[in-house]
Amino acid sequence: MTSVAERAQTRPGSRARSRDARRRLVVIGNGMAGARAVEEILARGGADQFTITMFGDEPYGNYNRIMLSHVLSGEESDADIFLNPLSWYEDNGITLHAGVRADRIDRFAKHVFSSDGRVTPYDTLIIATGSRPHLPPMDGLYTPGGSVKPGVFGFRTIDDTRKMAEHARNDHHRHAVVVGGGLLGLEAAAGLRSFGLGVDVVHSGSHLMSAQMGPDGGAVLRRSVEALGIGVLTGCRTTAVLGRDRVAGVSLRDRPDIPCDMVVVAAGIRPNVDLAVLSGLPVERAIVVDDRLRVQDEDHIYAVGECVQHRGEVYGLVAPLWEQAVVLANHVTGADTSAAYLGSRTATKLKVAGVEVASMGLQGPELDTDEHIVFSEPSRGVFKSIVVRDNKMVGATLLGDSRKVAFLTQAYDRGTPLPEERIGLMFDLGTPGEDVGVAELDDDAQVCNCNGVSKKDLAAAVKGGCTSVAGAMDATRAGKGCGSCKLLVKQVVEWAADGAVEEDPSATYYVPGIPLDKAALMAEIRQRGLRSVSAVFQALAPGGAEDAKSKMGLASLLKMMLADQYIDERDARFINDRVHANIQRDGTFSVVPQMKGGVTSVQQLRRIADVAEKHNVPLIKLTGGQRIDLLGIPKEDLPQVWADLEMPSGYAYGKSFRTVKTCVGKDFCRYGTGDSTKLGIEIESRFQGIESPAKLKLAVSGCPRNCAESLVKDVGVVAVEGGRWEIYVGGAAGAHIRKGDLLATVDDPEEVKVLTGRFMQYYREHANWLERTYAFVPRVGIAHLRAVIVDDAHGIAAQLDASMQASVDSYVDPWSERADPQTPGQFRTSLPLTVLPQVPVQ
């Protein structure tokens, strides 16, 4: 139980009236609606009119519940999602009773009775008690003592999220079931999947997100969700939670039981109205309010948020809460007593399990005269549905592509006439393009639904001095929720600044959690003698705070810089690097043993076949790097698989040097001019497994026919006439196609190895995190690279060679950890997984 700002006194000159002259405003509820209402009141001079007291069930400041799924997955920390920290209350003279529940209201004496025995008088009261998770009737949900069974979770609070993450990290827990396939359920499933757990979603509706979209869109969404490795069961009810003392599984109606260690119930919410009922306030589905957000028949009591019923409607989305808070604040402060809340036309735009979803109005046609325009591309996870009535848009669903959502939302809100060519509603044909669309948006158009930020708010931030997109986002909180609006935020800020937007300083940071570019970060690490990721955070991060999204990049950088002096910390590794295998969509792993230059032997082939048979490997595949991939191996089997193989790791999972592809060369090929196989094996033997900002794939071709595809590799070597070798850098042949640039032509294979190592070391020291060579080489320029690497124009060639040699000398086969695991649970299931930033597709 915490009380903040009770000791805060009126600061000299800060308020026009003395504290005693102000009316007493009490707010029950410190969630998003209650805190937003107080923010709006303060913005209208409320600090001069009221002493403000707030009660909150949770012992924290106000935080963004929409972001809880990001905390669960590790994308954000607890601190990242707080909207108003405890210091904000004190700074604004607000008395916050955090962790204190309001039990009863005496409407006649105007008192609030709270769980700590306190009696708090009020002149004006605001109820913002929000909602609670709905726990549908299921056998076995509770223990005999009446508490929820261990392993069963709601997903509503930050404490729920912490407990879920702790449970998911347990090495013995392997599978979770999420009851509910709506917004929250899918977010919970995606978050749990990031821990390596198997996850099934059980949804009673006929399709996912049935409240927001029709069955066709639900089918496309299902395909996208299943592609994440999440099982989906629709039209299915959970009837019981199995297990005596802890969760052991769930029973389903008309379906087989599902064994599991964890059950998350995300089957909707219910308004928190117990306090209102006990206090004699009018309650139907929720607390009944009028157009002023005043509780029916009460002159001094208001209500706002998910606990409110207005004109028969109860809203569970964020945007209506912001609209309600504005009207309420106008009446409470007297700023605009004519203000009226007339209900909300709900338009949702969110990212659900990584998939962009926008929904507004009708899901499909309801009248014979309704037009229904549909575009579906399931293979890309794209679905678009628009319902038109009397030449006005009355509903839309966008899945996987929300570029037109700003225009469609405005057309929906304003009822504007639509283009005759209806396909222009979905694509930039006959409707404003994105830039024009931003200029034509209403000032009051919502840009960020999560935090209630309008186009006008962003424009005001720019006029108020915000000179970058990041600055405007910090000032308004736009883009700080689900993140799906960031592109629109950027466009609005650039429009408001007439294109004069400063570059975001954070764009130069090597990792997001440390405010330094790569060169400065490396200099600080060397100067301070930092040797571990945690030491870097403590010394260089603001407030010493750790950032999950920065750990992997820092670990790679430190290992590159320090070689065997690096102090390895388990939680700084991505799941692939912790178990030295590549995680697959079903939670199993892929093992790729090293085959240098694509060359193998009878003994290796026999051993691989024996291992595949012994461990019932479900799929054996030849890779593009001329190796054999064993797929579908459970985590706990990895050490024994490696022991049975008795082959080194092929590094198919890491941000590192991976493989050298070769052709057969001059010994067997009648066109060959150089021994590509021998050189490829020597290069792979020398540089195996070295850390890198991104993956490195190499190739050596024995003649200009280029059978090993050397021209489209990170480093490619081609034998040419006269016993010479050409070295190409910066090639790519994946989603990005780029022919490599010629770095040098040399006479000796030994010189090939020297220049290859020197280029890779320069790339390791100067590339951005996750920047592939196909982006790095054109960014720095091939002329510059030739000058540094071939001509030694900067005098650093010897230093580059020595640094690479230090990394080569410190090499240890990671599969040796099978005999000496770093932690007892390293190869047990369900180790926590750190979500990577978006990695460029190759």
Image (cartoon, rainbow, N blue to C red):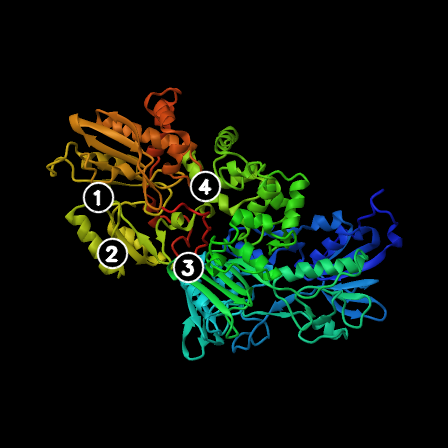
Point out residue 41 in the picture as x, y percentages from the top left corner: 76, 55
- Earlier sequence position, callout 2 versus callout 3: 3
Amino acid at pointer 1: Gly
Q: Residue at x 16, y 46 (%)?
A: 601
- Earlier sequence position, callout 1 versus callout 4: 4
The residue to which callout 2 is attached is 620
The residue to which callout 3 is attached is 381
Q: Nearer the viewer, residue 616 or 626?
A: 626
Residue 262 visible, this orientation: no
Find the residue positioned furthest to the bottom: 254
Distance of mark 4 from mark 2, alpha carbons? 31 Å
Distance of mark 1 from mark 4, alpha carbons? 29 Å
Contact check, label 4 and label 2, Cβ < 8 Å: no
Distance of mark 2 from mark 3, alpha carbons? 28 Å
The residue to which callout 4 is attached is 553
- Earlier sequence position, callout 1 versus callout 2: 1
The residue to which callout 1 is attached is 598
Regarding mark 1 in the picture, which secondary structure is present there?
Answer: helix
- From what the image shows, is residue 288 above or below residue 20? below
Pointer 1 local density, CA inside 10 Å: few below 14, some 14–19, many at least 20: many
**Nearer the viewer's eye, disc 3 or disc 1?**
3
Regarding mark 3 in the picture, which secondary structure is present there?
Answer: loop
